Amino acid sequence: MTEEEMKAEIDRLKAQNEALVKSSGGRVSLKVSPKGGVSVYGLGRFPVTLYKEQWDKLLAMAESIKAFIAENDHLLKKKE
């Protein structure tokens, strides 16, 4: 492979990578992990993975979490 062909391939791969990043566009998705947990992708760099019972417990606290966030809004940083 010539140097010119390698540069063309690098440019093609960069464009493909940018297209993949844009296509995910901040979407949140769910998957079952290999160990049987539920993984949430798209919130940050790494997925959040919890087992079913942990999700049930967390979701049952949804109103408490929302209230806590509202009460502490002035202390919380916002991702931009």
Image: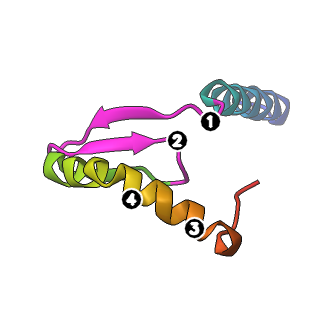
Residue in the picture at 65% in, 70% down: 76
Looking at the image, residue 41 sits to the left or right of residue 5; the answer is left
Q: Is residue 5 magenta?
A: no
Magenta span covers which residues?
A: 25-45
**Which quadrant would the C terminus be assigned to in this image?**
bottom right
Instruction: Name which residue type carries label 2.
Output: Gly
Label 3, on which residue? 71
Residue in the picture at 20% in, 47% down: 56
State which tag comes first along the sequence, 4 or 2: 2
Label 1, on which residue? 26
Instruction: Name which residue type carries label 4.
Output: Ser
Residue in the picture at 78% in, 31% down: 2
Looking at the image, residue 26 sits to the left or right of residue 61; the answer is right
Looking at the image, residue 4 sits to the left or right of residue 9; the answer is right
What separation in Å lies between label 1 and label 2 (alpha carbons)? Answer: 6 Å
State which tag comes first along the sequence, 1 or 3: 1
Instruction: Name which residue type carries label 1.
Output: Gly
